Image (cartoon, rainbow, N blue to C red):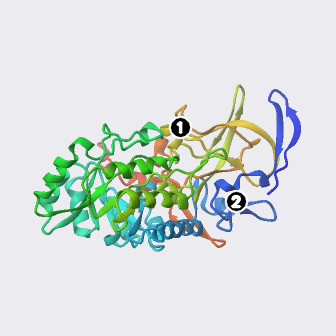
Amino acid sequence: MSITTRTAYPREGFGMTTFRTPAEIDLSLYPAGTTLDAQERLLIGGCAVSDLAEQYGTPAYLIDEGALRRTARTYVEAFARRHPRSLVLFAAKSFPSASVIGAVASEGCGTDTAAAGELGLALAGGADPGRVVFHGNAKSDDDIRAAIDARVRYVVIDNLDDIERIGRLADEPVPVLLRVSPSLEAKTHAAMMTGHDSSKFGIPSDQVQDVIRHIRREPLLKLRGLHAHVGSQLLDLDQFDAAVQALAEFERFDVYDLGGGLGVRYTSEDVAPSIDEYAQRITSAVHRHLGEDVELLVEPGRSMVARNGITAYRVVTVKRGVRTHAAVDGGMGDNLEVSLYGQAFSPAVIDRSGPTETVDLVGRHCESGDEIAHGAEVVSPRVGDLVTVPVTGAYCYTMSNNYNTALKPPVVFCRDGTSRLAVRRETFDDLLRREQLLTNRTTGE
Protein backbone atom coordinates (compact mmCIF):
# COMPACT_ATOMS: atom_id res chain seq x y z
CA MET A 1 0.00 0.00 0.00
CA SER A 2 1.52 3.33 -1.02
CA ILE A 3 1.91 6.05 1.59
CA THR A 4 1.46 9.71 0.69
CA THR A 5 2.49 12.44 3.10
CA ARG A 6 1.75 16.08 2.33
CA THR A 7 2.86 19.16 4.19
CA ALA A 8 -0.04 21.05 5.72
CA TYR A 9 -0.34 24.55 7.10
CA PRO A 10 1.13 24.78 10.60
CA ARG A 11 -1.21 25.31 13.51
CA GLU A 12 -0.38 28.47 15.35
CA GLY A 13 2.00 27.69 18.21
CA PHE A 14 2.34 24.03 17.29
CA GLY A 15 4.81 24.04 14.40
CA MET A 16 4.71 22.26 11.04
CA THR A 17 2.49 19.23 10.61
CA THR A 18 1.96 16.56 7.98
CA PHE A 19 -1.27 15.28 6.50
CA ARG A 20 -2.29 11.69 7.11
CA THR A 21 -4.97 9.50 5.58
CA PRO A 22 -6.48 6.27 6.95
CA ALA A 23 -4.44 4.36 4.35
CA GLU A 24 -1.28 5.36 6.18
CA ILE A 25 -2.06 3.42 9.34
CA ASP A 26 0.51 0.62 9.76
CA LEU A 27 -1.81 -2.34 9.31
CA SER A 28 1.10 -4.75 9.85
CA LEU A 29 0.58 -4.14 13.59
CA TYR A 30 -3.09 -5.12 13.38
CA PRO A 31 -4.56 -8.64 13.07
CA ALA A 32 -3.62 -10.21 9.75
CA GLY A 33 -6.39 -9.41 7.28
CA THR A 34 -7.30 -6.03 8.79
CA THR A 35 -8.43 -3.74 5.97
CA LEU A 36 -10.16 -0.47 5.12
CA ASP A 37 -13.55 -0.37 3.42
CA ALA A 38 -14.62 1.92 0.57
CA GLN A 39 -15.26 4.73 3.06
CA GLU A 40 -11.76 4.16 4.52
CA ARG A 41 -13.20 2.82 7.76
CA LEU A 42 -10.98 0.40 9.68
CA LEU A 43 -12.25 -3.18 9.58
CA ILE A 44 -11.17 -5.91 12.01
CA GLY A 45 -12.38 -9.41 11.23
CA GLY A 46 -14.49 -7.79 8.50
CA CYS A 47 -16.31 -5.58 11.05
CA ALA A 48 -16.05 -1.79 11.04
CA VAL A 49 -14.54 -0.63 14.30
CA SER A 50 -16.91 2.35 14.25
CA ASP A 51 -19.91 0.00 14.12
CA LEU A 52 -18.47 -2.11 16.94
CA ALA A 53 -17.96 1.02 19.04
CA GLU A 54 -21.57 2.02 18.52
CA GLN A 55 -22.87 -1.44 19.39
CA TYR A 56 -20.62 -2.37 22.32
CA GLY A 57 -19.35 1.01 23.53
CA THR A 58 -15.80 2.02 24.37
CA PRO A 59 -13.32 1.15 25.62
CA ALA A 60 -13.56 -2.34 24.20
CA TYR A 61 -11.16 -5.18 23.51
CA LEU A 62 -11.70 -6.35 19.92
CA ILE A 63 -10.39 -9.80 18.94
CA ASP A 64 -10.10 -11.03 15.37
CA GLU A 65 -11.21 -14.60 16.00
CA GLY A 66 -10.22 -15.83 12.56
CA ALA A 67 -6.71 -14.40 12.90
CA LEU A 68 -6.40 -15.89 16.39
CA ARG A 69 -7.36 -19.32 15.13
CA ARG A 70 -4.92 -19.04 12.21
CA THR A 71 -2.11 -18.15 14.61
CA ALA A 72 -2.93 -21.19 16.76
CA ARG A 73 -2.86 -23.45 13.71
CA THR A 74 0.42 -21.92 12.56
CA TYR A 75 1.95 -22.71 15.94
CA VAL A 76 0.67 -26.30 16.04
CA GLU A 77 1.75 -27.05 12.47
CA ALA A 78 5.17 -25.37 12.82
CA PHE A 79 6.12 -27.60 15.73
CA ALA A 80 4.35 -30.78 14.57
CA ARG A 81 6.20 -31.00 11.26
CA ARG A 82 9.58 -30.49 12.94
CA HIS A 83 9.00 -32.54 16.09
CA PRO A 84 6.01 -34.91 16.05
CA ARG A 85 6.13 -35.38 19.84
CA SER A 86 5.32 -31.76 20.53
CA LEU A 87 2.46 -29.99 22.24
CA VAL A 88 1.74 -26.27 21.99
CA LEU A 89 0.19 -24.99 25.24
CA PHE A 90 -1.55 -21.61 25.15
CA ALA A 91 -0.51 -19.58 28.20
CA ALA A 92 -3.91 -18.76 29.70
CA LYS A 93 -2.44 -15.93 31.79
CA SER A 94 -1.97 -13.86 28.62
CA PHE A 95 -5.75 -13.73 28.02
CA PRO A 96 -7.71 -15.61 30.71
CA SER A 97 -11.03 -15.88 28.93
CA ALA A 98 -12.89 -19.13 28.36
CA SER A 99 -13.76 -17.95 24.85
CA VAL A 100 -10.14 -17.26 23.91
CA ILE A 101 -8.86 -20.48 25.50
CA GLY A 102 -11.64 -22.45 23.81
CA ALA A 103 -10.88 -20.98 20.39
CA VAL A 104 -7.21 -21.95 20.44
CA ALA A 105 -7.95 -25.32 22.05
CA SER A 106 -10.26 -26.18 19.15
CA GLU A 107 -7.32 -25.53 16.81
CA GLY A 108 -5.14 -28.12 18.52
CA CYS A 109 -3.51 -26.24 21.39
CA GLY A 110 -3.29 -27.42 24.96
CA THR A 111 -3.37 -24.96 27.86
CA ASP A 112 -0.78 -23.68 30.31
CA THR A 113 -2.47 -22.64 33.57
CA ALA A 114 -1.02 -21.09 36.72
CA ALA A 115 -3.94 -21.06 39.16
CA ALA A 116 -7.15 -22.90 39.93
CA GLY A 117 -9.12 -20.06 38.36
CA GLU A 118 -7.25 -20.31 35.08
CA LEU A 119 -7.77 -24.06 35.10
CA GLY A 120 -11.49 -23.52 35.71
CA LEU A 121 -11.72 -21.11 32.77
CA ALA A 122 -9.84 -23.54 30.55
CA LEU A 123 -12.18 -26.41 31.39
CA ALA A 124 -15.21 -24.14 30.90
CA GLY A 125 -13.84 -23.21 27.48
CA GLY A 126 -13.62 -26.86 26.45
CA ALA A 127 -9.92 -27.51 27.06
CA ASP A 128 -8.91 -31.15 27.43
CA PRO A 129 -7.40 -31.59 30.94
CA GLY A 130 -5.09 -34.23 29.47
CA ARG A 131 -3.51 -31.39 27.47
CA VAL A 132 -3.22 -28.98 30.42
CA VAL A 133 -0.05 -28.19 32.38
CA PHE A 134 -0.49 -26.60 35.82
CA HIS A 135 2.09 -24.06 37.02
CA GLY A 136 2.39 -21.56 39.85
CA ASN A 137 5.20 -20.45 42.15
CA ALA A 138 2.90 -20.29 45.20
CA LYS A 139 0.31 -23.02 44.81
CA SER A 140 -2.20 -23.37 47.65
CA ASP A 141 -3.84 -26.59 48.72
CA ASP A 142 -6.86 -25.54 46.67
CA ASP A 143 -4.70 -25.07 43.56
CA ILE A 144 -3.07 -28.47 43.95
CA ARG A 145 -6.39 -30.14 44.68
CA ALA A 146 -7.97 -28.60 41.55
CA ALA A 147 -5.11 -29.83 39.35
CA ILE A 148 -5.24 -33.33 40.84
CA ASP A 149 -9.02 -33.55 40.56
CA ALA A 150 -8.92 -32.44 36.93
CA ARG A 151 -6.20 -35.00 36.13
CA VAL A 152 -4.07 -32.51 34.25
CA ARG A 153 -1.22 -33.77 32.09
CA TYR A 154 1.53 -32.43 34.37
CA VAL A 155 1.82 -30.42 37.55
CA VAL A 156 4.98 -28.32 37.53
CA ILE A 157 6.96 -28.43 40.79
CA ASP A 158 8.28 -24.95 41.60
CA ASN A 159 9.37 -25.41 45.22
CA LEU A 160 9.71 -27.94 48.03
CA ASP A 161 6.27 -27.07 49.41
CA ASP A 162 4.69 -28.23 46.13
CA ILE A 163 6.23 -31.65 46.77
CA GLU A 164 4.76 -31.82 50.27
CA ARG A 165 1.30 -30.68 49.15
CA ILE A 166 1.04 -33.10 46.24
CA GLY A 167 2.27 -35.98 48.39
CA ARG A 168 -0.30 -35.15 51.05
CA LEU A 169 -3.29 -34.49 48.78
CA ALA A 170 -2.85 -37.11 46.05
CA ASP A 171 -4.37 -40.57 46.31
CA GLU A 172 -2.75 -41.89 43.13
CA PRO A 173 0.49 -41.10 41.24
CA VAL A 174 0.70 -37.56 39.84
CA PRO A 175 2.96 -36.89 36.81
CA VAL A 176 5.11 -33.83 37.49
CA LEU A 177 7.76 -31.66 35.86
CA LEU A 178 10.42 -29.74 37.78
CA ARG A 179 10.86 -26.07 36.98
CA VAL A 180 14.53 -25.13 37.04
CA SER A 181 16.26 -21.78 36.78
CA PRO A 182 18.74 -22.10 33.91
CA SER A 183 20.88 -19.22 35.28
CA LEU A 184 20.22 -16.98 32.28
CA GLU A 185 19.79 -13.20 32.25
CA ALA A 186 17.18 -12.65 29.54
CA LYS A 187 17.39 -9.61 27.29
CA THR A 188 14.09 -8.04 28.26
CA HIS A 189 12.50 -5.79 30.88
CA ALA A 190 13.65 -6.72 34.40
CA ALA A 191 10.07 -7.54 35.44
CA MET A 192 9.87 -10.11 32.61
CA MET A 193 13.10 -11.96 33.48
CA THR A 194 12.35 -15.33 35.03
CA GLY A 195 15.34 -17.58 34.34
CA HIS A 196 18.05 -16.17 36.61
CA ASP A 197 19.01 -17.81 39.89
CA SER A 198 17.60 -14.96 41.99
CA SER A 199 14.18 -15.28 40.36
CA LYS A 200 11.16 -16.22 42.47
CA PHE A 201 10.41 -18.91 39.88
CA GLY A 202 11.86 -22.39 39.81
CA ILE A 203 14.73 -24.16 41.55
CA PRO A 204 18.18 -22.52 41.41
CA SER A 205 20.51 -24.54 39.23
CA ASP A 206 22.82 -25.57 42.08
CA GLN A 207 19.88 -27.15 43.98
CA VAL A 208 18.26 -29.03 41.11
CA GLN A 209 19.87 -32.42 41.67
CA ASP A 210 18.98 -32.42 45.38
CA VAL A 211 15.34 -31.57 44.58
CA ILE A 212 15.20 -34.33 41.95
CA ARG A 213 16.26 -36.83 44.60
CA HIS A 214 13.66 -35.39 46.99
CA ILE A 215 10.86 -35.83 44.44
CA ARG A 216 11.89 -39.41 43.72
CA ARG A 217 11.54 -40.29 47.37
CA GLU A 218 7.82 -39.41 47.20
CA PRO A 219 5.83 -42.47 46.04
CA LEU A 220 2.90 -40.44 44.62
CA LEU A 221 5.05 -38.08 42.52
CA LYS A 222 6.20 -39.33 39.13
CA LEU A 223 8.92 -37.05 37.79
CA ARG A 224 8.67 -36.99 33.99
CA GLY A 225 10.89 -34.09 33.01
CA LEU A 226 12.14 -30.54 33.36
CA HIS A 227 10.68 -27.11 32.70
CA ALA A 228 12.45 -23.81 32.03
CA HIS A 229 11.18 -20.37 31.07
CA VAL A 230 13.75 -17.59 30.80
CA GLY A 231 11.50 -14.57 30.28
CA SER A 232 8.86 -12.79 28.24
CA GLN A 233 8.96 -10.54 25.14
CA LEU A 234 12.22 -12.10 23.95
CA LEU A 235 13.32 -11.00 20.48
CA ASP A 236 16.69 -12.77 20.36
CA LEU A 237 16.32 -16.46 19.51
CA ASP A 238 19.79 -17.22 20.87
CA GLN A 239 18.28 -17.02 24.36
CA PHE A 240 16.05 -20.02 23.68
CA ASP A 241 19.00 -21.99 22.38
CA ALA A 242 20.90 -21.14 25.57
CA ALA A 243 17.99 -22.39 27.71
CA VAL A 244 18.02 -25.76 25.95
CA GLN A 245 21.77 -26.05 26.43
CA ALA A 246 21.34 -25.28 30.12
CA LEU A 247 18.77 -28.07 30.52
CA ALA A 248 21.16 -30.49 28.84
CA GLU A 249 23.55 -30.02 31.79
CA PHE A 250 21.20 -32.00 34.02
CA GLU A 251 20.34 -35.67 33.76
CA ARG A 252 18.21 -36.62 30.78
CA PHE A 253 14.44 -36.96 30.89
CA ASP A 254 11.66 -37.92 28.51
CA VAL A 255 9.79 -34.59 28.73
CA TYR A 256 10.98 -31.00 28.35
CA ASP A 257 8.80 -27.92 28.67
CA LEU A 258 10.60 -24.84 27.35
CA GLY A 259 8.00 -22.30 28.41
CA GLY A 260 7.08 -19.38 26.19
CA GLY A 261 8.49 -15.90 25.83
CA LEU A 262 8.60 -15.21 22.09
CA GLY A 263 8.31 -11.44 21.61
CA VAL A 264 6.14 -9.48 19.20
CA ARG A 265 6.20 -6.18 17.32
CA TYR A 266 4.48 -3.33 19.16
CA THR A 267 5.64 -0.51 16.88
CA SER A 268 6.64 -0.16 13.24
CA GLU A 269 10.30 -0.02 14.27
CA ASP A 270 10.25 -3.34 16.14
CA VAL A 271 11.64 -6.52 14.60
CA ALA A 272 10.49 -9.89 15.93
CA PRO A 273 11.13 -13.49 14.83
CA SER A 274 8.31 -15.35 13.12
CA ILE A 275 6.62 -18.37 14.66
CA ASP A 276 8.29 -20.53 12.01
CA GLU A 277 11.74 -19.16 12.86
CA TYR A 278 11.09 -19.73 16.54
CA ALA A 279 9.92 -23.31 15.99
CA GLN A 280 12.94 -24.05 13.82
CA ARG A 281 15.40 -22.73 16.39
CA ILE A 282 13.73 -24.47 19.34
CA THR A 283 13.42 -27.89 17.69
CA SER A 284 16.93 -27.75 16.25
CA ALA A 285 18.34 -27.00 19.70
CA VAL A 286 16.28 -29.79 21.27
CA HIS A 287 17.43 -32.32 18.68
CA ARG A 288 21.03 -31.24 19.09
CA HIS A 289 21.17 -31.15 22.89
CA LEU A 290 18.33 -33.34 24.20
CA GLY A 291 17.47 -35.79 21.44
CA GLU A 292 14.82 -36.28 18.77
CA ASP A 293 12.51 -38.60 20.69
CA VAL A 294 11.68 -36.45 23.73
CA GLU A 295 8.25 -34.97 24.38
CA LEU A 296 8.54 -31.23 23.74
CA LEU A 297 6.16 -28.64 25.20
CA VAL A 298 6.11 -24.90 24.53
CA GLU A 299 3.85 -22.30 26.13
CA PRO A 300 3.21 -19.30 23.84
CA GLY A 301 1.01 -16.55 25.22
CA ARG A 302 1.95 -13.08 24.03
CA SER A 303 2.94 -14.30 20.57
CA MET A 304 -0.37 -16.16 20.25
CA VAL A 305 -2.76 -13.31 21.07
CA ALA A 306 -1.02 -9.92 21.17
CA ARG A 307 -1.37 -8.94 17.52
CA ASN A 308 -4.81 -10.52 17.23
CA GLY A 309 -6.41 -7.99 19.58
CA ILE A 310 -6.83 -4.23 19.55
CA THR A 311 -8.45 -1.76 21.94
CA ALA A 312 -10.90 0.89 20.80
CA TYR A 313 -11.38 4.18 22.69
CA ARG A 314 -13.10 7.52 22.23
CA VAL A 315 -11.38 10.83 22.82
CA VAL A 316 -12.98 12.60 25.79
CA THR A 317 -10.96 15.80 25.95
CA VAL A 318 -7.92 17.46 24.35
CA LYS A 319 -5.60 19.89 26.14
CA ARG A 320 -3.01 21.88 24.19
CA GLY A 321 -0.17 23.64 25.97
CA VAL A 322 3.44 22.71 26.57
CA ARG A 323 2.35 19.28 25.41
CA THR A 324 -0.85 18.09 23.78
CA HIS A 325 -2.77 15.63 25.93
CA ALA A 326 -5.54 13.65 24.27
CA ALA A 327 -7.48 11.87 27.00
CA VAL A 328 -9.58 8.81 26.17
CA ASP A 329 -12.28 6.95 28.07
CA GLY A 330 -9.89 4.20 29.22
CA GLY A 331 -6.26 4.06 30.27
CA MET A 332 -4.32 2.14 32.88
CA GLY A 333 -7.54 0.47 33.98
CA ASP A 334 -7.48 -1.53 30.74
CA ASN A 335 -3.78 -1.31 29.76
CA LEU A 336 -1.11 -1.51 32.46
CA GLU A 337 1.66 -2.44 30.04
CA VAL A 338 2.87 1.16 29.75
CA SER A 339 2.87 1.87 33.48
CA LEU A 340 4.44 -1.45 34.47
CA TYR A 341 6.93 -2.06 31.68
CA GLY A 342 7.21 1.18 29.74
CA GLN A 343 5.88 -0.65 26.70
CA ALA A 344 5.53 1.50 23.57
CA PHE A 345 2.31 1.35 21.56
CA SER A 346 1.24 2.82 18.21
CA PRO A 347 -2.22 4.41 18.54
CA ALA A 348 -4.14 5.85 15.62
CA VAL A 349 -7.07 8.23 15.20
CA ILE A 350 -9.07 6.23 12.67
CA ASP A 351 -11.61 6.72 9.90
CA ARG A 352 -10.62 10.24 8.90
CA SER A 353 -7.82 12.21 7.29
CA GLY A 354 -6.22 15.36 8.62
CA PRO A 355 -3.06 17.13 9.73
CA THR A 356 -1.05 15.22 12.27
CA GLU A 357 -0.06 16.29 15.74
CA THR A 358 2.33 14.89 18.32
CA VAL A 359 0.29 13.99 21.38
CA ASP A 360 0.47 12.14 24.65
CA LEU A 361 -2.44 9.72 24.61
CA VAL A 362 -3.51 9.59 28.24
CA GLY A 363 -6.21 7.89 30.26
CA ARG A 364 -8.93 8.97 32.68
CA HIS A 365 -7.30 7.73 35.88
CA CYS A 366 -5.85 9.86 38.67
CA GLU A 367 -2.21 9.07 37.96
CA SER A 368 0.31 11.12 36.01
CA GLY A 369 1.68 7.81 34.78
CA ASP A 370 -1.67 6.95 33.21
CA GLU A 371 -0.45 7.02 29.61
CA ILE A 372 -1.16 4.79 26.65
CA ALA A 373 1.42 6.39 24.35
CA HIS A 374 3.92 9.19 24.80
CA GLY A 375 4.73 11.50 21.89
CA ALA A 376 2.61 9.66 19.33
CA GLU A 377 2.03 11.26 15.94
CA VAL A 378 -1.66 10.92 15.08
CA VAL A 379 -4.29 12.80 13.11
CA SER A 380 -4.92 15.89 15.23
CA PRO A 381 -7.46 14.58 17.76
CA ARG A 382 -10.94 15.95 18.44
CA VAL A 383 -13.46 15.09 21.11
CA GLY A 384 -15.45 12.06 19.98
CA ASP A 385 -12.75 10.64 17.70
CA LEU A 386 -12.24 6.91 17.65
CA VAL A 387 -8.74 5.79 18.61
CA THR A 388 -7.42 2.27 18.15
CA VAL A 389 -4.37 0.81 19.87
CA PRO A 390 -3.10 -2.36 18.18
CA VAL A 391 -1.19 -5.27 19.74
CA THR A 392 -3.19 -5.20 22.98
CA GLY A 393 -4.33 -8.82 22.81
CA ALA A 394 -1.88 -9.97 25.48
CA TYR A 395 -1.98 -9.08 29.17
CA CYS A 396 -4.11 -5.93 28.83
CA TYR A 397 -7.33 -7.82 29.56
CA THR A 398 -5.42 -9.91 32.09
CA MET A 399 -4.40 -6.90 34.16
CA SER A 400 -7.57 -4.83 33.76
CA ASN A 401 -8.65 -3.24 37.03
CA ASN A 402 -11.14 -0.92 38.69
CA TYR A 403 -8.99 2.14 39.37
CA ASN A 404 -11.38 5.10 39.95
CA THR A 405 -14.17 2.52 39.72
CA ALA A 406 -13.49 2.01 36.04
CA LEU A 407 -15.63 -0.79 34.66
CA LYS A 408 -13.72 -3.50 32.85
CA PRO A 409 -14.30 -3.39 29.08
CA PRO A 410 -16.07 -6.08 27.08
CA VAL A 411 -14.31 -8.58 24.85
CA VAL A 412 -15.79 -8.72 21.36
CA PHE A 413 -14.97 -11.47 18.87
CA CYS A 414 -15.05 -10.47 15.20
CA ARG A 415 -14.99 -12.93 12.33
CA ASP A 416 -16.07 -12.84 8.68
CA GLY A 417 -17.99 -9.59 9.12
CA THR A 418 -19.96 -10.62 12.19
CA SER A 419 -19.32 -9.97 15.87
CA ARG A 420 -20.30 -11.56 19.15
CA LEU A 421 -19.85 -10.67 22.78
CA ALA A 422 -17.32 -13.00 24.42
CA VAL A 423 -17.13 -11.17 27.78
CA ARG A 424 -19.72 -8.53 28.66
CA ARG A 425 -18.79 -5.12 30.02
CA GLU A 426 -18.59 -4.98 33.79
CA THR A 427 -21.37 -3.01 35.52
CA PHE A 428 -21.49 -0.97 38.70
CA ASP A 429 -23.84 -3.60 40.10
CA ASP A 430 -21.03 -6.16 39.64
CA LEU A 431 -18.84 -4.05 41.90
CA LEU A 432 -21.60 -3.37 44.40
CA ARG A 433 -22.43 -7.06 44.81
CA ARG A 434 -19.14 -7.58 46.61
CA GLU A 435 -19.84 -4.84 49.15
CA GLN A 436 -21.18 -5.97 52.51
CA LEU A 437 -23.19 -2.86 53.37
CA LEU A 438 -24.13 -2.10 56.96
CA THR A 439 -27.79 -1.38 57.68
CA ASN A 440 -28.80 2.17 58.52
CA ARG A 441 -28.37 2.34 62.31
CA THR A 442 -31.26 4.82 62.64
CA THR A 443 -33.90 3.24 60.48
CA GLY A 444 -32.67 -0.36 60.66
CA GLU A 445 -32.91 -0.61 56.88
Residue 367: % across, % down = 52, 33
The location of residue 326, given as percent across then percent down, is 67, 39
Structural crowding at the residue carrying mark 2, measured as other residues with C-alpha within 10 Å and reported as few (<14), some (14–19) or many (≥20): some
Type of the residue with mark 1: Gly
Residue 410 visible (yes or no): no
Q: Residues within 10 Å of mark 1 (few under 14, many from 20)?
A: some
Tell me what residue is drawn at x 63 percent, y 46 percent. Answer: 267
Placement of 198 over or under 438, stated as above or below? above
Among numbered discs 1 and 2, the one appearing first in the sequence: 2
The spot of residue 27 in percent (x, y) is: 70, 56
Query: Which residue position holds label 2?
Result: 50
Judge by depth and name the residue closer to the eye, 329 or 111. Answer: 111
Question: In the drawing, what numbered circle is on residue 332?
Answer: none
Q: Where is 189 relative to 3, above or below?
A: above
**Type of amino acid at the residue the image marks with label 2:** Ser
Q: CA distance from mark 1 to mark 2?
A: 29 Å
- At horizontal 38% and vertical 62% (from top left) the residue drawn is 297
Q: Which mark is residue 342?
A: 1
